[in-house]
Image (spheres, rainbow, N blue to C red):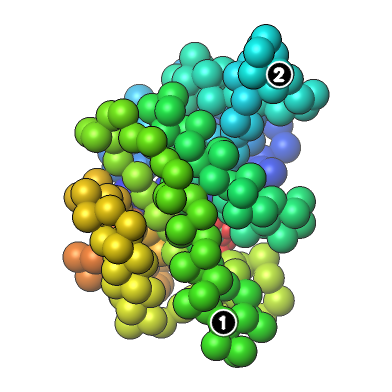
Amino acid sequence: MKLIVANWKMNPVSVDEAIELAKATDRENVVICPPFVFIEEVAKVVNKGKLGAQDLFWAPPTGGAAGGVVTGEVSAQELKNIGTEYVIIGHSERRQKLGETNQIVAKKFAAAIDKELIPILCVGETLEQKKSSEKEEVIKEEIISAFQNLKIKNWKLKIFIAYEPIWAISTNKNAKPDKPENTLETISFIKEILRDLDKNLSRFTHFLYGGSVNSKNAGEFLKYEEIEGALIGGASLIAEEFNKIVDIAS
Ligand code: PGA
């Protein structure tokens, strides 16, 4: 089964709209990632689907010896406690607009896994990096830094990697979706890196594509076995459009 992840970003602006959208898109094999402020209310109406968050902070909610208290942040444990099962890590908007480095992303990724939240690790290159043939190097660094020091206690846990070329994300100027063949190539490139790191990794790592996915192009990506789902921004806010994608996926 394919996994369809709704990344609502900073939408909608009211809890009533969030509940309405969640009810209308609560389907099997769907993960709904609302803004933090709505997760708890959305959790009450999501039954068939699963709940996800868009980010977390790696430190525990109390300082103590770990000394991790950071004003304004949300911990993996807090997310777990309100029923969150998935978490998006290292989305390109956070990397680009908030300066999230590979090191920061690696800590968040490890924190998610430590608390048994299923991470959706986002990787992908900018248009400039693509043009200057740096794509592979950038993705390799993103993958290696996230996985190299990872300590996995629960080998049943799934890990999702979302290949999201930054130039393909609909909120960016002149965005257009990747070509499915390129996504396939990128996925095999990432699989090779994972195999080199640890041959066990490939057994529980799954791949999503993200970037301007809609009901017209979803089928072109999802028809491939290697593309195990999609991470969807803009189209996840329109219930009818999102449900069409879920229909295609199933
Ligand atoms: P998009 O966003 O579907 O609107 O391109 C995807 C994302 O940013 O995760």
Q: Front-most of 125 and 48? A: 125
Residue extending furthest toward the right: 71
| Residue depicted at 45% across the width and 44% down the height | 149
Position of 72 relative to 33 (above/below): above
Q: Is residue 177 above or below residue 11?
A: below
| Residue 88 relative to residue 13: left or right | left
Check the image and report above or below for 28 versus 140: above
155 or 219, nearer to the observer: 155
Q: Is residue 6 left or right of residue 58?
A: left
In the picture shown, does residue 92 fall above or below 88? below
- Residue type at mark 2? Gly
At horizontal 60% and vertical 31% (from top left) the residue drawn is 58
Inspect the image, locate mark 1, and give the three-letter code of the amino acid beneath it.
Glu
For this view, does 211 lie left or right of residue 187?
A: right
Image region (quadrant) for ligand 1:
bottom right
Residue 162: numbered disc: none
Do the CB atoms of the residues marked 1 and 2 lie less than 8 Å apart?
Answer: no
Q: Residue 156 sits in which quadrant?
A: top left
Foreground mark, 1 or 2? 2
Q: Is residue 238 visible?
A: no
Q: Position of residue 13 (x, y in %)?
A: 72, 37
Question: Circle 2 sits on which residue?
Answer: 67
Between residue 172 and residue 125, name the one nearer to us.
Answer: 125
The residue carrying mark 1 is: 134
> How many tags in the picture?
2
As helix, strand or loop, the secondary structure at mark 2 comes to loop
